[in-house]
């Protein structure tokens, strides 16, 4: 079966609309990219669509090299009219920590600056990485995490690693296993999981024989094919487990959470 994420999406959207109306000012999100891959281009397109729908001012800045990328990030960080800065991952040929370090932590709506990452380690999730937050919100909506065996496939700094940290937080207390390309016997590990989170970017990585009957499978993958967007989870898994769809799953919640974070940044910046 597939999980319907629409109710969660609508709740977050309504919360955003209410906050925007009380703020009563133009909210601005700036997206910064360099050599965007297909999944990134899809995300930027969806960000633009949603920002427009919510009345959030939105622009994309495409840098052509490292110097230009860094100067754009510095300029946006000191621009009082900009509330949130989003920088795409991957950034080919660029040391990512150096790039995210240029963003003012108060505008770092994806929680990627070392300050916000450090806060996350202490359990403070003011700006948690949006996809990790999306996965946690989806799971908290449908299941009990305490003591659950959760397997995260993928260890990126944007998704897998922060997600593992968030699932470990005392009020969630999942038992977390993180897998990657050097993991041996992935199938054996995922078969024992109550919850599998696929965040690898590999089509059909998770097949039916790899999951337990009636488990939950969260598909984070966004793979662009000639026939549209597909995730990391083979569709046959939905006959055995409860699965989040792609499209219309984690990606949709991620995008609305990004907008929620921009509104939070605008609220906070107003006070300071
Ligand atoms: N739905 C959404 O909102 C979002 C979707 N995405 C999508 O999720 C996917 C992952 O994104 P991201 O984390 O940024 O990607 P990265 O490429 O940065 O990381 C991928 C991770 O998956 C691991 N991996 C890759 N192949 C395998 C495999 N065969 N077996 C086990 N582990 C594997 C890699 O291992 P190793 O470290 O060993 O290389 C790595 O840790 C992409 O498709 C991306 O487009 C990303 C963000 C948000
Ligand atoms: N710093 C950074 N953070 C990210 O979170 C990040 C990134 N870089 N780089 C690229 C990947 C990919 N990604 C997507 C998120 C949502 C959709 C999304 O909402 N997609 C629609 C697809 C709709 C369609 O076009 O069919 C859906 O899933 O319903 C897509 C892709 C975030 N990523």
Image (cartoon, rainbow, N blue to C red):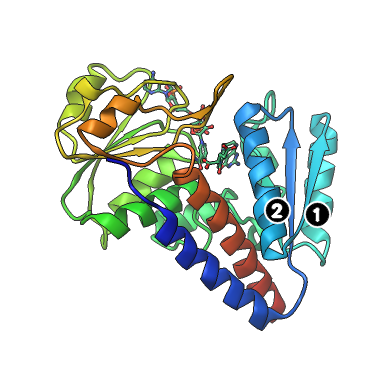
Residue that appears at 47% across and 34% down:
156
Callout 1: few (<14), some (14-19), or many (20+) C-alpha neighbours within 10 Å? many
Seen at 23% across and 32% down, the residue is 239
Q: Which residue is mark 2?
A: 85
Quadrant of res 89? top right
Q: Is residue 104 visible in the rendered structure shown here?
A: no
The mark that comes first in sequence, 2 or 1, is: 1
Circles 2 and 1 in contact, beta carbons < 8 Å: yes
Quarter of the view holding residue 211? top left
Q: Position of residue 158 (x, y in %)?
A: 51, 41
Q: Which mark is residue 76?
A: 1
Q: CA distance from mark 2 to mark 1?
A: 7 Å
Quarter of the image where the C terminus is located: bottom right
Where residue 267 appears, as percent x and y from the top left, is 65, 75
Mark 2 Cα shell of 10 Å, populated few (<14), some (14-19), many (≥20) = many
Asked if residue 183 is positioned above or below residue 218 in the image, the reply reads above
């Amino acid at each position: 079966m597939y999980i319907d994420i629409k109710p969660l999406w609508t709740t977050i959207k309504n919360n955003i609309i209410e906050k925007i109306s009380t703020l009563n000012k133009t909210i601005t999100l700036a997206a910064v990219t360099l050599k965007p891959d297909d999944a990134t281009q899809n995300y930027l397109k969806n960000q633009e669509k949603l920002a427009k729908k919510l009345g959030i001012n939105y622009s994309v800045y495409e840098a052509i090299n490292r110097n230009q990328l860094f100067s754009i990030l510095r300029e946006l960080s000191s621009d009082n009219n900009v509330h949130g800065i989003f920088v795409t991952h991957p950034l080919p040929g660029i040391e990512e920590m150096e790039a995210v370090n240029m963003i003012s932590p108060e505008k770092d709506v994806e929680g990627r600056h070392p300050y916000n990452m450090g806060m996350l380690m202490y359990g403070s999730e003011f700006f948690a990485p949006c996809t990790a937050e999306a996965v946690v919100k989806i799971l908290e909506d449908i299941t009990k995490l305490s003591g659950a065996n959760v397997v995260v496939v993928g260890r990126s700094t944007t998704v897998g690693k922060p997600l593992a940290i968030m699932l470990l937080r005392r009020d969630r207390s999942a038992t977390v296993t993180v897998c990657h390309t050097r993991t041996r016997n992935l199938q054996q590990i995922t078969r024992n999981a109550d919850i599998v989170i696929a965040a690898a970017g590999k089509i059909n990585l998770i097949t039916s024989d790899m999951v337990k009957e009636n488990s939950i499978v969260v598909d984070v993958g966004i793979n662009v094919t000639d026939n549209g967007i597909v995730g990391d989870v083979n569709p046959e898994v939905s006959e055995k487990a409860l699965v989040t769809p792609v499209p219309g799953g984690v990606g949709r919640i991620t995008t609305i959470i990004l907008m929620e974070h921009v509104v939070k940044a605008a609220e906070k910046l107003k006070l300071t």
